[in-house]
Amino acid sequence: MTPRSLYLRSHGFLRLMVTVCALGIGLAACGSDKPAAESAPPNSIAEASTTPKGTSLTTAQASTLARILLKNHEAGGAEFDGEVKFGTAATFQLKGVVDWKNAVGRIELTTKRSDNVEVPVQTIVWGGSSVFLSAPGLTEALAARGHPGIAFLQRPVSIRTNPLDQVITLIASFSSARAENPLLLRQGDTSFEGAGTLGGRPVQKLRFGRSTYSVADDGIAYQIDTRFVSIDGPIVIGFTDHGPKTVEQVNPTAVLPLAQYVDVYNSLVGSGPAPTTAAAS
C-alpha cells in the first residue's frame, strides 16, 4: 500500500481497512463497503438518555452511527482540536482545519513533554502523499545553509511508524461519500455508552470497537474518543464549525526534503518522545 492511498477521497478510506484497522482506528477506516440498508430515523438524545450504558445499539442508533462519515462528506470540512497522550512521555495538543472535499488539512501542534523540555509550536500541513513540517526559526536556519526562502520540509506519509501520521489518518479519513451498513454495525462490536452534553450540545455516545463517537441530534459526530494499539494513551479529537473549508497550502517553491535536513529540524524541535520527523527518508 502506498502512502498516497491514505488520502483517497470519498469511500477510498475503505481500502485502508487492512492497514489502518491494525492501528485500531475504528469506524473511520474499518467500516463495511456493502450498501447501506434502509432504517428508522435516529433516536433523539432525550430518548437515549434513559438507556443503560453498554446496551446494544437500537436500529435507529445504528443508522445514526452508519451515517456520520457521510455527514462529514456533505459538510465538506471542519475545524478540530484534540489531545493525544503518549503514555507518560509526551502529549500532543492539536488545533487545525480539515478540508475533506480536497483531502487536505493543517494543524498547529503543541508538544508537552514530561521532562519539561520546551518544544516550539509546529505547523503541519498534509495533502496527497506528503506531510509538510515547519517550526519557528526554520527559514533562518536553512538560509544559513544556503537555502533562503524555505518555509517547510517535506516527508512522505508513514502511518505504520509515525504516531502523528496515524492521528492525521483518523482525521483525514473521517468522511465518506456513502453510508455504512447499519445492520452490519449492529452485528459488530458496538454499544450505546450514555448521553451527555458537549459544548452545550446534547449528544449520545455510540461505540464502535475502540472508538466512541459523541453524536448530536443533527447526526454529526462532534468528538471521537479512541485508542490505537500503537499509542499508549487516549486520543480525543473534537470537531466544530462544519462546512466548506479552505486550507492554506504550502508553496512548492518554498519546500525542501526533510530527509536531507533532519538535523536542522530536530535542532529546532528536538528528537525526544513522539517525534514528528519519524520516517523522514
Image (spheres, rainbow, N blue to C red):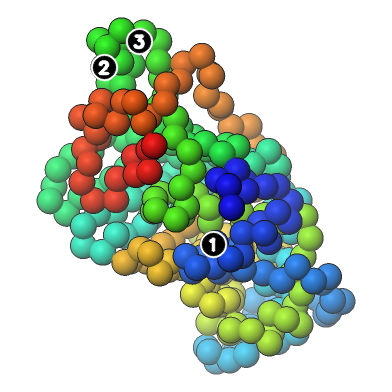
Expressed as whole percent of the image width and height from the top left, the position of residue 271 reads: 22, 41
Q: What is the three-letter code of the residue carrying label 1? A: Val
Reply above or below: 275 against 234. above
Quarter assignment of residue 29:
bottom right
Sequence-wise, which precedes: disc 2 or disc 3?
A: 2
Distance between mark 3 and mark 1 Cα atoms: 37 Å
Q: Give the labeled residue for mark 2.
A: 141
Pick the front one: 145 or 51: 145
Q: Which mark is residue 20?
A: 1
Expressed as whole percent of the image width and height from the top left, the position of residue 112 reads: 24, 48
Expressed as whole percent of the image width and height from the top left, the position of residue 222 reads: 57, 60
Task: Kindly identify the residue that appears in the image at 24 percent across and 33 percent down.
Answer: 266
Q: What is the three-letter code of the residue carrying label 3? A: His
Reply above or below: 43 against 176. below
Q: Residues within 10 Å of mark 3 (few under 14, many from 20)?
A: some
Expressed as whole percent of the image width and height from the top left, the position of residue 168 reads: 49, 49
Q: Which mark is residue 147?
A: 3
Sequence-wise, which precedes: disc 1 or disc 2?
A: 1
